[in-house]
Image (tube, rainbow, N blue to C red):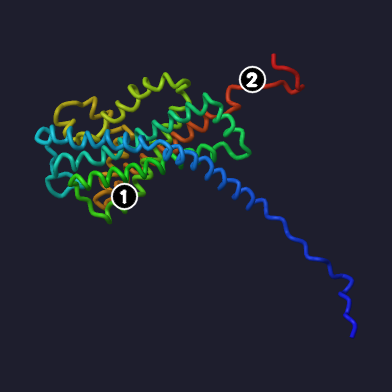
Amino acid sequence: MTAVPPPQDAAPAVAQPPRPGSLRLAHALRALRAVAGRELHSFVRQPGRLLSALVRPLLWLLVFAAGFQNVFGVAITPPYETYIEYRVYLLPGLLGMVALFNGMQSSLAMVYDREMGVMRLLLTAPLPRWWILACKLAGGAFLSLMQMFAFLLAAWAFGIDLALKNVLFALPVFLLAAVMLGALGLVLSVYVRQLENFAGTMNFVIFPMFFLSTALYPLWKLQESGAWMVHGIARFNPFTHAVEAMRFALYGQWLGESLAVVVACTIAFFALALWGYDPQRGAPRRPQGGGPPP
């Protein structure tokens, strides 16, 4: 019995090449893993960073709050339904401090990468510039979120009780605040040209943003004491809205106005960073003939 030959018009199966969209997606995910993973690996290689990130707010929580417990009275205002200890009021502001200083640490790392030439290599990668910066921002924001969660555990160990369901409810707000402060760090890394200038940035950006906010005292206390200028600045401080959004979220409530301000500031800061890291901005335009610029 002889085998029947295949039809003449039958063609061998040819493997279809992957679609261009899948290649771009895979490339973008590899870039996210590489850029954000570099941030995480750098943090793991420096265990002292976590300790330093926790020591500063814990000192404020245990020493500053204890010293001013009877000085800063906190009235029954939303989201609180009863009188609270001052350290309970201080907790969201210290969470903001953790995210703020980690955002500035990421900014310092970007300044270092620019001096070493790493940022130039990243910006010349065959990916959109906004995606590269978004990957850097994602890595820094994730680190901020982990440090904030570690600080919450430490605060719980020192006697500050928080409902677990409210903490889980507040995690997206924590992440949003971390992204906003990380985007602010991106903007600062554009204008801080040398590592030696970072101390000035700390003095003129970080500390005013922290102290001229509701992290340490409520707005009504500023108004009551007659500090109208400080009260006005604190009302328009993006850090104030990040702290207040986290404060309400820890009690299972959304503060729509503050959340909207945080989202708007995040978009504005990221757009400014994207504009600042444009390698073509300010470059001399060549004439159409292809000759050297005049």
Left or right: where does residue 128 sit relative to residue 183? Answer: right
Nearer to the camera, 76 or 13: 13
Report x, y in % for residue 191: 46, 23
Q: Which residue is mark 1?
A: 170
Report x, y in % for residue 53: 32, 36
Left or right: where does residue 41 sit relative to residue 257? Answer: right
Task: Relative to 153, say whether 215 is above or below.
Answer: above
Question: What's the amino acid at mark 1?
Answer: Ala
Report x, y in % for residue 60: 22, 34
Report x, y in % for residue 18: 68, 55
Task: Relative to 224, say whether 138 is above or below.
Answer: below
User: Which quadrant would the N terminus be assigned to in this image?
Assistant: bottom right
Q: Are marks 1 and 2 in contact (CB under 8 Å)?
A: no
**Quarter of the figure with residue 243:** top left
- Kindly report which numbered mark, 1 or 2, lies closer to the viewer in this rendering: 1
Task: Relative to 130, say whether 17 is above or below.
Answer: below
Question: What's the amino acid at mark 2?
Answer: Pro
> In 3D space, how far apart are the residues under numbered discs 1 and 2 (Cα atoms)?
48 Å
Work out which residue is located at the far top of the displayed protein and give it: 294
Q: Residue at x 19, y 43 (%)?
A: 88
Nearer to the camera, 60 or 208: 60
Residue 284 has which mark?
2
Left or right: where does residue 42 sit relative to residue 62? Answer: right
